[in-house]
Amino acid sequence: MQTQTEAAALTNREKGEKTSKLRKKIPAGKISVAIFIVVMLIYPLFRFGIMWGYINIRALWTSFTRYDLMTDSNIFVGTLQYEILFRRLATDEYTRQTLVTSILYFPVTCGYRCRFLLFLPIFCLRRYRGQRFTG
C-alpha cells in the first residue's frame, strides 16, 4: 500500500513527464531574427568597446605622467598628480564641483549610448501598422 507522500511524489513525476512532452520548440524564424540582431550588434559594440577602452587606458596612463614642453614628451611622475588633486579637493570648491559633474556625466552618456545601440535594431525590425511589404 502506498503512503500519501509516495502518491504525491508519483503524481509530481507524472506531471513532470507531461510538461516535458509539452515543451514548445522555438520556431526557426525567431532564431534567425535573433542571430541577425546579434550579428548587427557585433560591430557597433566592438567599436564602442575599442574606443572606450583605448580612451580610458590612455587617460589612466596620462594621469601618471606630466607633459614636458622642453623635450616634447611625457615624463612619468607617479602619484604626484593624485596628491595635487586630493590637496585641491580639500581646499578648492571649484575642483569639487568639477569632479561631481564629471562623475555624474559618465553614466548618463554611457547609458544613453548603450541603450541606443541595443534598441535601434529592435525598432528597425519591428512591424508597424500600415506596413505594406512583408520583409
Image: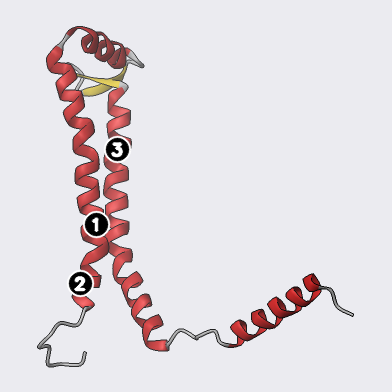
Query: Which numbered disc flags the more N-terminal residue, 2 or 1?
Result: 1
- The residue depicted at 78 percent of the width and 77 percent of the height is 7
Secondary structure of the residue carrying tag 2 is: helix
Q: Where is residue 72 in the image (x, y as percent from the top left)?
A: 19, 23
How crowded pointer 2 is (Cα within 10 Å; few <14, some 14-19, many 20+) is rated as few
Find the distance from the CA under tag 2 to the CA under tag 1: 12 Å
Quarter of the picture holding the N terminus: bottom right
Is residue 97 or residue 73 the one in the foreground?
97
Q: Residue at x 35, y 70 (%)?
A: 38
Q: Where is residue 57 in the image (x, y as percent from the top left)?
A: 33, 37
In the depicted view, which residue is nearer to us: 42 or 109?
109
Q: Which image quadrant: the C terminus?
A: bottom left
Q: Which mark is residue 2?
A: none
Kind of residue at disc 2: Phe
Cα distance in 3D space between marks 1 and 3 = 20 Å
- Measuring 24% from the left and 70% from the top, which residue is drawn there? 121
**To which residue does mark 1 refer?**
115
Of the two numbered discs 3 and 2 in the rendering, the one whose residue sits closer to the viewer: 2
**Front residue of this view, candidates 51 and 114:** 114
What percent of the width, then of the height, locates residue 65? 29, 21
Q: Which mark is residue 56?
A: 3
Amino acid type, callout 1: Arg
Residue 41 is left or right of residue 13, and the answer is left
Q: Which amino acid does label 3 sit on?
A: Asn
Mark 1 against mark 3, which lies toward the viewer? 1
Can you say whether 122 is above or below 101 in the image? below
User: Crowdedness of circle 1 by 10 Å Cα count: few (<14), some, many (20+)?
Assistant: few
- Give the CA separation, mark 3 to mark 2: 31 Å
Of the numbered discs 3 and 2, the one sitting upstream in the chain is 3
The way the protein has been coloured in the rendering is secondary structure
